[in-house]
Amino acid sequence: MLGSIEDAEDAVQETYLRAWARLESFAGRASFRAWLYGIATNASLDALRRKKARRWPSDVAGPADPANYALAGVDLPWLQPYPDRLLDAAAPADAEPEAAVTARETIELAFLAAIQRLPSRQRAVLVLRDVLDWSVRNTAAALGMTPAAVNSALQRAHATLAEHLSMGRGEWRSSSSAAERALLQQFVTAWERADTAALVRLLRNDAGLVMPPSLTWFAGREAIERFFRQQVFGVRGPNWRLLPTAANRQPAFGLYWRASDDVAYRPFAVGALRTTGDLIDEIALFVDPQLFMPFALPATL
């Protein structure tokens, strides 16, 4: 719903406070779980009324020219990655409906970026109806809507998603974890060796590279290759280390850089890869060292 670790944690706390204050209002007409989910959904809606939707660089600006660009950060509310270790703790594989909420097709960054385009109430309807598989009646009751309004909101949400996702949720194909681990290891090895050619061979021809909080992003292997050769390994040099992790059910990594006058590698960005088969569709670099803590990544290497 919120696309942010901090906002989600705040909403969880608000949900518990509201549930405790209203505990006597639970009448038992629905399950306690459904009652609590209704409170959580409305807490999220209230949060969305106070804040702007989380953005994705390719939704805000066009691709940059690798010969002429700026990497300055822009003060926008950016979509954030979510550590798989927290998803696994919250939702064991056999737990419903939590397993559905944290399944790859509904937690992957591409899906979360797409639903950020939806008005908040359409987003809530989509999550309750499509992800949690709630009935129209229960969704309407939780959101204070009529059944007709719920159906209309869901229809509009589907139309918007169809414009911004390359395929329907039912058609998504997740790579095997073994294939993804192998691809991530090749990516890590190429980066740590500052081997631009090897890194670019792992990309699809139409791959993208986004780097929030910068608006700058690159489209296509040629543009990405030039950026890595000139900026990442040219200006910054070869002093990089990567630690594999996982985010949003995608292969991910903690990226560390060591300055020439430093003895330690320090946090630079958390990266996530969107893959198809044995190639990379998109590299997302979240240049925010504060993200290392929720991923339980070490402060230095």
Image (cartoon, rainbow, N blue to C red):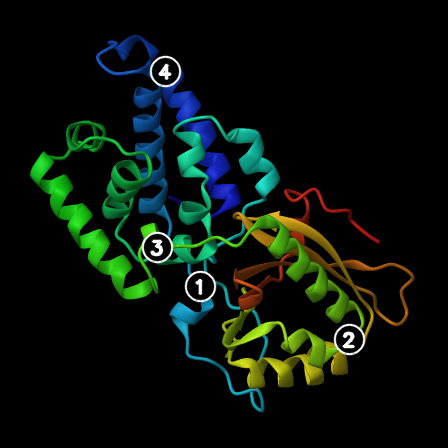
The x and y percentages for residue 168 are: 31, 56
**Residue that numbered label 3 is attached to:** 171
Q: In this image, 31 relative to 74: left or right?
A: left
Q: Quadrant of residue 201?
A: bottom right
**Residue that numbered label 1 is attached to:** 56
User: Foreground mark, 1 or 3?
Assistant: 3
Q: Earlier in the sequence, mark 4 or mark 3?
A: 4
**Residue that numbered label 4 is attached to:** 21
Compute the Cα span from label 1 to label 3. Answer: 23 Å
Check disc 4: other Cα within 10 Å, few if <14, some if 14-19, many if 20+.
Answer: few
- Quadrant the N terminus occupies: top left
The x and y percentages for residue 157 are: 22, 52
Q: Residue at x 7, y 39 (%)?
A: 148
Q: Earlier in the sequence, mark 4 or mark 1?
A: 4
The amino acid type of the residue labelled 1 equals Trp
The x and y percentages for residue 33 are: 35, 20
The answer, for residue 33, to whether it is visible in the render is: yes
**Residue that numbered label 2 is attached to:** 194
In the image, residue 48 sits, relative to residue 57, either above or below, namely: above
The amino acid type of the residue labelled 2 equals Ala
Compute the Cα span from label 2 to label 4. Answer: 56 Å
Query: Helix, strand, or loop for circle 2?
Result: loop
The amino acid type of the residue labelled 4 equals Ala
Please state which of residues 232 and 289 is positioned toward the viewer in this rendering: 232
